[in-house]
Amino acid sequence: MTARRTRIALAGLIFGFGCAAAPARAATCDIALVLALDVSGSVTHQTYGLQRDATAAALESPAVASAARDGLALSVVMWGSGQHTVLPWRILTTAAEASAAAHALRQVARPEAGMTDLASAIRASVAEFRALPCAATRRVLDISGDGRHSGMPSDLAGAVADARAYDIQINALPVVTDAERDVAEWYREHVTSPSGGFIVAADWSGFARAIRMKLSMEVAGR
């Protein structure tokens, strides 16, 4: 091989290594949203189905379809004693992709029925955001639950602080029941207010309307 050909070959090899080493450009999205659904023991089989299907229906709303045009990153976590990512990150850019996510959510079987470990649910959601596949303008954690955290208050406070430090706004849909009549006030004091978020409270009969309204507010930038 001549000296000139050798130089050309080496230049091509170096260029190839440079291309391989260059990091992939992250996709952009306006909002990254984790939906965290309560599947603890206080949630019955009937209310689990209601919560899951109403959340799926909310994903098919015109508000979500509109937000998807600017890029909407979505992940769904179900939580109780453990935390289960039942819908890994997907970036929605069309109404059809939002409907596909809704369809996938409707197929999810209940993963457990344990304690109400809200602190671990928040930490698992923060971990989801750290693995986000796009550069998001806003990060929102949307939690629904019908009871208070069953662990130490300091664990919950630490988890909320972790979310706040990662610029995650926590919003909540507390489900008011006979057993937990003041759960909305508890969520406001211990979960949403410290993170700069808001609540939309409802009982189970009003859950479908509440999750649709709440999701519309979140994607609109409330």
Image (spheres, rainbow, N blue to C red):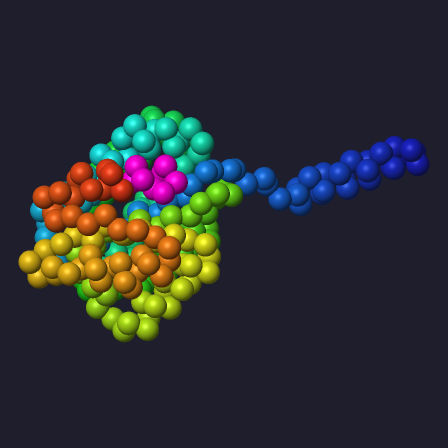
- Residue at image point 45% right, 32% down: 70
Q: Give the image location of residue 145, x and y in percent.
A: 21, 55
- Residue at image point 69% right, 39% down: 19
Q: Main secondary structure of the magenta part?
A: helix
- Residue at image point 55% right, 41% down: 26
Q: Quadrant of the N terminus?
A: top right
- Residue at image point 15% right, 61% down: 182
Q: Over which residues does the magenta segment extend?
A: 215-222
Residue nearer the viewer, 217 or 51: 217
Residue nearer the viewer, 176 or 20: 176
Q: Is residue 219 magenta?
A: yes
Residue 213 vs 157, above or below: the answer is above
Quick one: which residue is furthest to the right in this view?
3
Residue nearer the viewer, 4 or 167: 167
Left or right of 68 on screen, residue 99: left
Which picture quadrant has residue 127? Answer: bottom left
Q: Give the image location of residue 3, x and y in percent.
A: 93, 36
Residue nearer the viewer, 29 or 101: 29
